[in-house]
């Protein structure tokens, strides 16, 4: 199965935030959309970084509440692991586990096209396993 299969079922909406937005503004975006991470982008189609709730918590622990007034660019992860629609889901799942990341932007022709979470990957895998089980049960009951 490919990343395109996951995106087809979940949709391709991606929430972005500009690098100069404050961490406080970022928190509002996360809460408003009920998400755990956003892609940092100057134009909505390029990837400058990614920032998650975990990044905010870690920087709050180090710097205190002052971090809320800092730009997102000061806490974002710059080296972003990405994937493409043609990548295998199993490969991405392994990479996400190995790198301990939960959100991976999907690029098409170098432009931001979607985002896949570990939850999306797990949901897709569970669905796939249920389909296999149903097929086997049907085969046995024939």
Image: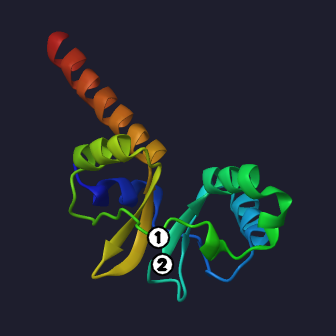
Q: CA distance from mark 1 to mark 2?
A: 6 Å
Of 56 and 134, which appears nearest the observer? 56
Outermost residue toward the top?
A: 141
Identify the residue at horizontal 76%, vertical 58% (top origin).
63
- Of the residues tagged 1 and 2, which is closer to the observer? 1
Q: Quadrant of the C terminus?
A: top left
Q: In the picture, residue 24 is in which quadrant?
A: bottom right
Residue 47 position, x and y percent, is: 45, 77
Identify the residue at horizontal 71%, vertical 68% (top origin).
26
Q: Is residue 20 left or right of residue 84?
A: right
Q: Is residue 4 above or below residue 108?
A: above
Q: Is residue 114 left or right of residue 137?
A: right
Residue 103 position, x and y percent, is: 47, 55
Identify the residue at horizontal 21%, vertical 52% (top origin).
88
Outermost residue toward the bottom?
A: 43
Residue 23 position, x and y percent, is: 74, 68
Crowd tier of the residue under label 1, counting other residues whose Cα lies within 10 Å: few below 14, some 14–19, many 20 or above: some
Q: Is residue 53 visible?
A: yes
Q: In the picture, residue 97 is in which quadrant?
A: top left
- Residue 22: give its label: none
Per the image, the residue denoted by label 1 is 78
Of 44 and 74, which appears nearest the observer? 74
- Which structural element holds mark 2? loop
Identify the residue at horizontal 28%, vertical 42% (top origin).
94
Proximity of marks 1 and 2: CB atoms separated by less than 8 Å? yes
- Residue 48: give its label: 2
- Which structural element holds mark 1? loop
Outermost residue toward the right?
A: 65
């Amino acid at each position: 199965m490919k990343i395109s299969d996951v995106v087809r079922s979940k949709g391709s909406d991606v929430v972005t935030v500009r690098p100069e937005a404050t961490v406080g503004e970022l928190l509002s975006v996360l809460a408003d959309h009920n998400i755990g991470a956003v892609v940092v982008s100057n134009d909505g189609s390029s990837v400058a970084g990614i920032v998650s709730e975990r990044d905010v918590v870690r920087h709050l622990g180090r710097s205190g509440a002052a971090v809320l007034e800092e730009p997102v660019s000061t806490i974002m992860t710059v080296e972003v692991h990405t994937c493409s629609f043609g990548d295998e889901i199993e490969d991405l799942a392994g990479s996400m586990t190995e790198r301990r990341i939960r959100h991976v932007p999907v690029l098409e022709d170098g432009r931001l096209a979607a985002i896949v979470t570990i939850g999306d990957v797990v949901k897709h895998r569970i669905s796939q396993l249920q389909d296999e089980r149903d097929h086997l049960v049907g085969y046995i009951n024939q």
